Image (spheres, coloured by chain):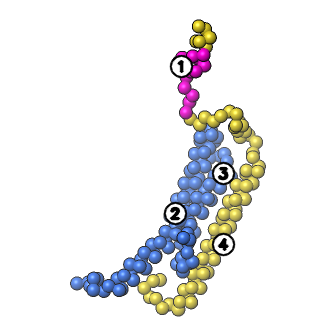
Chain colours: A yellow, B blue
Amino acid sequence: MAAGLRAVRRWGLAAAAPPRLAFTRSAFVVRKANNAQPNWLGVGLAFGTSAALWGFLIKQHNEDVVEYERRKHARGHKCTGCS
Amino acid sequence: MAFLPDESRSLAPPPLFNKGSVWLGFAGWLSALADNAFNQRPVFRAGVHRQILFASVGFFVGYQLVKRAEYVHAKVDRELFEYIRHHPVDFQSA
């Protein structure tokens, strides 16, 4: 009978506390986050990606401005409806 | 279907800092702050590289979306004015 009761407790039928729902992950696959030491690879990648994005964006914007002006002059101001 | 067809380059490019880019950049920054909060880190002082990255990605995506939106609006306007030009009878101003 004791073995039966132990089995019931293992199955969680005897008033077991439910696991909290917030942000639970299996402890077998995650490491404890160490926020004390910087993840330099991550920091480098983040700054590098940001710099690349900004560089690309600014370059693309300047090219777009030049291309727009070039096409406006090539059209010869025929269309007065649009600016 | 291209996200930004070649004829979109005939339009004036939107300014770098426009409603979409600034708002989405701000939203990206807020989500980095939220990530700090959920992982129990100091909200503003932690993960500055993450804040900058998320804000930059949001800014970039916002800028591209605004460019596409302006192209779609210009295309619809052009079709509308062409239609009005071809059907003057329906658009007599009385």
Residue type for callout 2: Gly
- Disc 2 with disc 4 on a shared chain: no
Q: Is residue A52 magenta?
A: no
Whole-angstrom CA distance, mark 2 to mark 1, is 53 Å
Magenta-span inclusion, residue A9: yes
Q: Which residue is mark 2?
A: B20
**Residue holding disc 4:** A59
Q: Secondary structure at mark 3?
A: helix
Residue farthest to the left, as pictured? B94
What residue sits right under mark 3 in the picture?
B50
Q: Foreground mark, 2 or 1?
A: 1
The residues bearing labels 2 and 4 have C-alpha atoms spaced at a distance of 19 Å
Task: Estimate how packed mark 4 is, as few (under 14), some (14 to 19) or many (20 or more) residues with alpha carbons within 10 Å.
Answer: few
Residue B36 in percent (x, y) is at: 62, 44
Label 2 packing within 10 angstroms: few (<14), some (14-19), many (20+): many
Q: Which of the two residues, A32 or A83, is positioned nearer the viewer here?
A: A32
Seen from the viewer's position, the closer of residues B59 and B10 is B10
Q: Could you tell me how far apart the alpha carbons at marks 3 and 2 are, in whole angstroms? A: 21 Å
Residue under the point 59% across and 41% down? B37
Q: Chain of mark 3?
A: B
Q: Cα distance, mark 3 to mark 1?
A: 44 Å
Q: Do pointers 2 and 1 mark residues of a single chain?
A: no
Please identify the quarter of the rendering in which residue B91 is found. Answer: bottom left
Q: Is residue B33 above or below residue B76?
A: above
